Amino acid sequence: MQVRYLYLPIILSFLILLSQNVSGEQKIITINYPPDKTIREFFDAGISLSVPLSLVDKIHVKAENNIEGDIIPDSKFECFNVPLIYGLNSITITAYKNNKTLEQVILTIFRRSDIESSYKNPPSDFTKDLFHMNARKECSACHELTPREADRTPVNIATYSELYFKDNLSYISKTSTCYSCHKKITSYPFVHGPASVWSCLSCHNPESIPRYSVKQPESDVCFGCHTEQKTEWKSKKIIHGPVNIGRCAICHSPHSAPNEYNLVKPVWDLCTSCHDDKKSGQHIVGGMFFKDGHPTKGKPDPVRPGKELSCASCHNPHASNFPNLWALEAQGPFDLCLKCHKYYYK
């Protein structure tokens, strides 16, 4: 009898563990990256997770703006990208077996913005976690985490062309170690030159801290190629704030964007993100000649055929020699009006 009592605690422990597994408390979804409550600043977030293949036959992912999709797991690690909105993003990840829910986890990511005042300051318990700051041994089994020569090749602006990218995409996908994980960053219609040919180290410094960060001010890096703009803008009397502090990425995506000139938003939306007092439509001659003010969007631009009227129709977004960053070499407000409304001039 005494021998049986000796084994009783072991048997009870086994039964407790078994009951926990049966009740669904077994860990199914493991988020490898990023940690919960992480801060991001670009369009997408790369996510890596693991599930036991013997237990899971489908993973459902749902994010903000009703973005959702299914993943059929076929390897130890599943990696994918999720588009982000500004502010708090709740990404719900659910594991299924035969359409039965096994486990659900919610990953929270905050996309901050330098131009959206509501999203400049993340909650205090959110932190930045940069992937390449750690060894990431779980990823190195499948991915080479250091750049190859193809990633180091600097862009020569004298010989660069989009044709080079199109003809060499298959070559780049096989030779660039950055491409396999980061290819989503060039998926938007307007792609920045160095990113399109995966010359990542043209801008990113592998010796920097944090690793692969861009030298600051970032305009020093941008002006390495955009030499004409540097010469022109530095010669002007009035320089737009983001240009003056060397923060090109406030307005332009350094990789790719859905908008012309790699703008992170359409022109009018981008400008009014900071100049929110100009959203009313009363910006120009409002209450003077026109009850509703002069339109600042939604109309054709008389000076730039094929373009829509926007803030950039009247203001230079980078630098000008004239007050209020007036464009078109306008000497004064009335002179600016006459650039379009020539029929008033006798």
Image (tube, grey):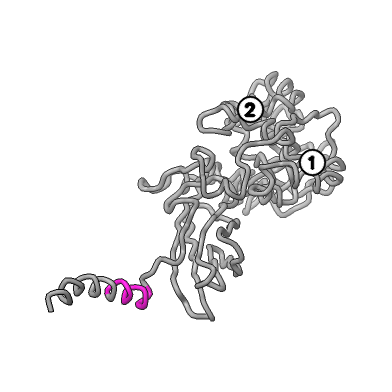
Give the labeled residue for mark 1.
340
Give the labeled residue for mark 2.
219
Question: Where is residue 57 shown, x and y percent of the image?
Answer: 56, 73
Label 1 or label 2, whichever comes before in sequence order: 2
At 51% from the left and 75% from the top, the residue drawn is: 96
Quadrant where the image shows the C terminus: top right
Residue 40: assigned label: none
Locate residue 28 relative to residue 273 in the image: left or right: left
Q: Nearer the viewer, residue 294 or 26?
A: 26
Q: Nearer the viewer, residue 211 or 14?
A: 14
Using the numbered discs, state the Cα–Cα distance from disc 1 to disc 2 in whole angstroms.
Answer: 33 Å
Kindly indicate the quadrant of the structure image that contains residue 153. top right
Would you say residue 9 sits in the magenta stretch? no
Quadrant where the image shows the N terminus: bottom left
For residue 251, say whether it is visible.
Answer: yes
At 70% from the left and 18% from the top, the residue drawn is: 235
Locate residue 112 relative to residue 226 in the image: left or right: left
In the image, the segment drawn in magenta is 16-24
Residue type at mark 2 is: Ser
At 40% from the left and 66% from the top, the residue drawn is: 27
